Image (cartoon, helix red, strand yellow):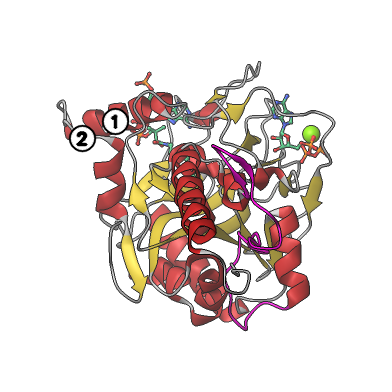
């Protein structure tokens, strides 16, 4: 922000008061997951501020550093995602595969890991194998898999969104199974912020790396460019005839005419995306298990929020319900406690998260 030369004291004081009010508004709207408020230039009380004395920030979704080109930065600001080709090596991806297979064979049992089967086989007899596990999450205690979250080539980009103090908040390896015909392999359109009780959203980013060639046939990511500029929308289970996986909440009222981009990616390509970006993934129409590994990172100076009374209340209830079932009792935990347990520092200093 620039001040006009030698402002009169009264003007300066008024401008500072306006700035404080705008900051308060920004904080309030930030809690609602509404980052577009970051560009507030109009005073909430007394009309617009003269543009000569108050310049809106040009960028709000990315931070100043030398990693992103101006073009890449503008692309993320505008679209809410950025694909970096060939970022993670084949050798690293092979190690993640090997460890995933060990977990599937139950030769490795990392503490805290959640194992998910597709809902179409959830109630059937099975022996754990690469063909029955559709997703693992919370692998923060698995040394091999957690290496993904510490790779310098990944963190270099993450820092453009989070700044230097970086927490790994949420980890997943998705093994999208061949669709059984019930279309349950789809992931409905959603915003990841729905699951997160921390803010501000602009300091959160997902890194999602393709572990093989991924296109529309095996269920690539689908994104609605620019939707990161909107607010957090209410999420619930879609009404799908064939059933929906536990916790696969979707947005009910997204704009059906909004442009969709199918992200075709090669092994090692990584997409960084904003937690308000509406995205999902389609059916896997091949016989292979489509693999991707991901981590949601946040700035260590993000803060937790209480989601009671907000659109996120339903997910808190469900997640706490699962925690209670796992503990075999009423755990007394809330969404914030659950996230604090799994959060891990990967760079810099642990602050508020
Ligand atoms: C950026 C964030 C984005 C996200 O977080 S997206 C959502 C990600 N979250 C997840 O993937 C985690 C969801 N999965 C889980 O929590 C667990 O896998 C889940 C569903 C609780 C099951 O865990 P377990 O307790 O190990 O499994 P279980 O075999 O004992 O089953 C318990 C009851 O759950 C049912 N179940 C299992 N997998 C399911 C599924 N995929 N969809 C719907 N229901 C499912 C299962 O049938 C059983 O039901 P019942 O109690 O017998 O009636
Ligand atoms: N009825 C629906 N309600 C909510 N989300 C849906 C619905 N149908 C599809 N989706 C989701 O919309 C996204 C895009 O679907 P789209 O049909 O464009 O692609 P796809 O399913 O990957 O490709 P294809 O149609 O070629 O199989 C996916 O995330 C999918 O899960
Ligand atoms: O299908 C995928 O890999 C994307 C899953 C996803 O968006 C999520 O779990 O939040
Ligand atoms: Fe997601
Ligand atoms: Mg489709």
Which image quadrant: the N terminus? bottom right
Instruction: Compare residues 204 and 7 and report the one nearer the observer.
Output: 7
Instruction: Compare residues 72 and 85 and report the one nearer the observer.
Output: 72
Task: Assign a secondary structure to mark 1.
Answer: helix
Residue at the image position 59 percent from the left and 37 percent from the top: 231
Circle 1 packing at 10 Å, graded few (<14), some (14-19), many (20+), is some
Asked whether residue 338 appears in the rendered view, the answer is yes
Q: Which residue is mark 2?
A: 333
Viewed as shown, does residue 208 lie left or right of 127?
right
Asked whether residue 266 appears in the rendered view, the answer is no
Please tell me whether residue 336 is drawn above or below residue 332 in the rendered image.
below
Residue at the image position 56 percent from the left and 80 percent from the top: 91
Please tell me whether residue 113 is drawn above or below residue 259 in the rendered image.
below
Residue 212 screen position, x and y as percent:
68, 64
Residue 178 screen position, x and y as percent:
67, 41
> Is residue 61 on the magenta stretch?
yes
Q: Are marks 1 and 2 in contact (CB under 8 Å)?
A: yes
Region of the chain picked out in magenta, as a range: 41-69
Q: Which residue is mark 1?
A: 320
Please tell me whether residue 75 is drawn above or below residue 242 in the rendered image.
below
Residue at the image position 49 percent from the left and 81 percent from the top: 152
């Amino acid at each position: 922000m620039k001040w006009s030369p030698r402002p009169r004291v009264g003007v300066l004081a008024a401008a500072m008061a306006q700035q404080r009010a705008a900051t308060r508004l920004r904080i309030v709207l930030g809690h609602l997951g509404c980052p577009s408020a970051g560009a507030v230039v109009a005073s909430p009380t007394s009309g617009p501020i003269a543009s000569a004395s108050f310049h809106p920030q040009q960028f709000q979704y990315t931070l100043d550093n030398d990693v992103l080109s101006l073009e890449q930065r503008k692309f993320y600001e505008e679209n809410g995602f950025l694909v970096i080709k060939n970022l993670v090596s084949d050798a690293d991806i092979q190690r993640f595969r090997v460890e995933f297979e060990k977990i599937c064979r139950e030769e490795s049992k990392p503490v805290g890991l959640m194992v998910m089967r597709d809902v179409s086989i959830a109630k059937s007899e099975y022996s754990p194998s690469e063909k029955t596990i559709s997703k693992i999450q919370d692998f923060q205690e698995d040394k091999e898999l957690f290496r993904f979250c510490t790779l310098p080539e990944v963190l270099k980009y993450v820092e453009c969104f989070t700044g230097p103090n970086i927490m790994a908040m949420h980890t997943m390896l998705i093994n999208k199974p061949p669709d059984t015909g019930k279309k349950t392999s789809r992931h409905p359109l959603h915003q990841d912020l729905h699951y997160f009780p921390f803010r501000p959203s602009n300091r959160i980013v997902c890194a999602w790396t393709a572990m093989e060639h991924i296109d529309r046939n095996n269920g690539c990511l689908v994104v609605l460019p620019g939707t990161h500029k909107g607010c957090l929308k209410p999420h619930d289970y879609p009404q799908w005839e064939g059933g929906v996986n536990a916790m696969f909440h979707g947005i009910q009222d997204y704009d059906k005419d909004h442009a969709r981009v199918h992200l075709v990616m090669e092994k090692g390509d990584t997409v960084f995306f904003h937690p308000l970006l509406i995205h999902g993934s389609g059916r896997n129409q091949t016989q292979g298990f489509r693999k991707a590994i991901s981590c949601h990172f946040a700035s260590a100076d993000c803060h937790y929020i209480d989601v009671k009374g907000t659109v996120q209340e339903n997910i808190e209830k469900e997640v706490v319900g699962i925690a209670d079932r796992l503990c075999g009792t009423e755990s007394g935990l809330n969404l914030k406690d659950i996230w604090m347990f799994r959060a891990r520092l990967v760079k810099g200093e642990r602050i508020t998260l």
